[in-house]
Amino acid sequence: MKPIYLSLTDAKHILVILVFLVQTNITNSTTTSTQRFATQLIHYDSILSPFYNASATIIDYATQAHERSISRLSYLNATTMVETPDDIRGVITAPPEGAFLVNMFIGQPGVQQFLVLDTGSSTTWVHCFPCIGCNSIHPIFNPSQSLTYYALPCNHDPYCAANCDHQRNWCTYSESYMDGTSNSGNFATEKFTFVIPNVGATIASNILFGCGRMVNEPHIEISGVMGLGYEEISVVTQIGTKFSYCIGSVRDPYYPYNRLIIGSGANMIGKLTPLDLHNPYYYLTLESISVGHRDLPISPRVFRRTSRGDRGVVIDSGCEWTFLIREAYVPFINTVQQIIARYVARATFPNQPTWLCYYGVASRDLIGFPIVRLNFNGGANFSLGIQNLFQAVTNRIFCLNVAEANGKTPSDVSIIGVIAQQSHNIGYDLSARMLSIDKTDCRTL
Ligand SMILES: *[C@@H]1O[C@H](CO)[C@@H](O)[C@H](O)[C@H]1NC(C)=O
Ligand SMILES: *[C@@H]1O[C@H](CO)[C@@H](O)[C@H](O)[C@H]1NC(C)=O
Ligand SMILES: *[C@@H]1O[C@H](CO)[C@@H](O)[C@H](O)[C@H]1NC(C)=O
């Protein structure tokens, strides 16, 4: 018989199919080989988002993104301190709103959900039918119509025994927030299907999540949260110890390549820097900020988290703006203002008089503006170009998306937001406690 020779492209193609089949098998059993659950991240304001508002303007987007960022900052403000009074630590300020939604399906047959991506919490929860007060704008997941739903019973473990709804034999959870909102229900396991349209789907079975039965958060229309924190209950730690994401564009409503990968197949590329896990955030060791080739005069000590839990630098998925502690913000802003004055004139944005704004179009008028680098312990860095620092607020005004953290937070925590993280692949390795950062075109991953 004539041997069959495959061209390289054919061979690659077949390999892809094999890998896909093998992965499907692996994900259905729970062996420890390479697992790669890849999904699309959808910005709130994207045309792919259920919250897309065709009549909203760039001013609306910029203002809302700022509001969400400030509310995120106050959320971290209330939760990072070790000795925040009990009445604040027990109840979190506000439910996470975030910036990105995870496109996924829950159950069998799968029901599509858009869950808020949150690296600052570990519990994943989804509205479940019947639900009192659920206000989400997409179909609510109905466990009784799913073949793969399993409600944890009260005798599941000591936690469940202590948090038991005896009438229904449910293991319960409950979260309440300082702004009066709350959400509670039962713990269950389900099949999660992660989807990238036109690329493929991967299935993770028996994922533990909170089935939200009683939700009191009238201003929020989300259908749930995907917690990518490091605690045991997190989807990340249920699947493995790694995840990565790449956000190519926060603002372009048509950009389709923002990606999240969970599992050992996450993209761990580029240089490494230590990742510290606290309370329940991801902290980085920021050593310096440079503009062009010049290091700004900032002592690295101002970025260190103290034993009380104040200060420190959190990398966050839910905050668009970047907030710097005053000792870093002042030298940063002075340098930026000095350089930018050579290019464009200062403008006032009437809606937000405190923002630092300029006349012009950043991508056109700031050609030659030096790269700003956030340099971390170990040699990794975020390399901030014009699109990582500035956003248009009208056709002729753009503003800086970096603000001062002080005065707004007694904890003085600095936050690296997603606008700064754009065009970097960011890999989290929870067992090695390392973060990998690589400047990347997300379309190539
Ligand atoms: C959509 O945007 C317009 C313009 O800002 C606003 O008036 C309207 O309330 C928004 N609609 C929704 C559903 O948010
Ligand atoms: C930060 O928390 C303190 C209480 O610890 C509170 O007084 C202050 O208003 C909070 N700031 C923000 C911006 O939420
Ligand atoms: C910053 O990180 C990139 C990798 O993303 C690396 O190529 C570059 O050399 C680093 N720059 C500095 C100054 O360390």
Image: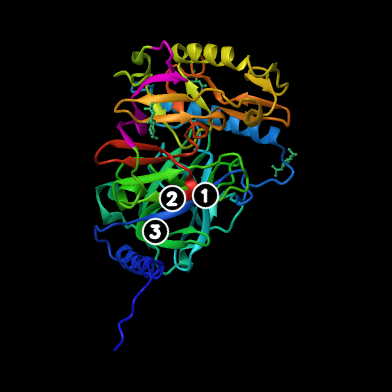
In the depicted view, which residue is nearer to us: 115 or 430? Answer: 430
Residue at mark 3? 168
Describe the element under mark 1 as helix, strand or loop.
loop
Q: Which is more N-terminal, label 2 or label 1? A: 1
Task: For the N terminus, give its image quadrant.
Answer: bottom left
Magenta region, residue range: 271-298
Q: Where's residue 144, x and y in %?
A: 46, 66
> In front: mark 1 or mark 2?
2
- Give yes or no for residue 276 being in the magenta stretch: yes
Describe the element under mark 3 as helix, strand or loop.
loop
- Give yes or no for residue 235 being in the magenta stretch: no
Kind of residue indicated by mark 2:
Leu
The crowding category of the residue bearing disc 2, from other C-alpha atoms within 10 Å (few below 14, some 14 to 19, many at least 20), is few
Residue at mark 1? 257
- Residue at 57% from the left image edge and 15% from the top image edge: 339
In the depicted view, which residue is nearer to us: 158 or 66? Answer: 66
Q: Where's residue 277, x and y in %?
A: 31, 32
- Asked if 71 appears above or below 137 in the picture, the reply is above
Q: Which is more N-terminal, label 3 or label 2? A: 3
Describe the element under mark 2 as helix, strand or loop.
loop
**Is ligand 3 within 8 Å of the beta carbon of the residue shown at mark 2?**
no
Q: Where's residue 434, x and y in %?
A: 29, 36
C-alpha separation, residue under disc 2 versus residue under disc 3: 46 Å
Kind of residue indicated by mark 3:
Arg
Residue at mark 2? 445
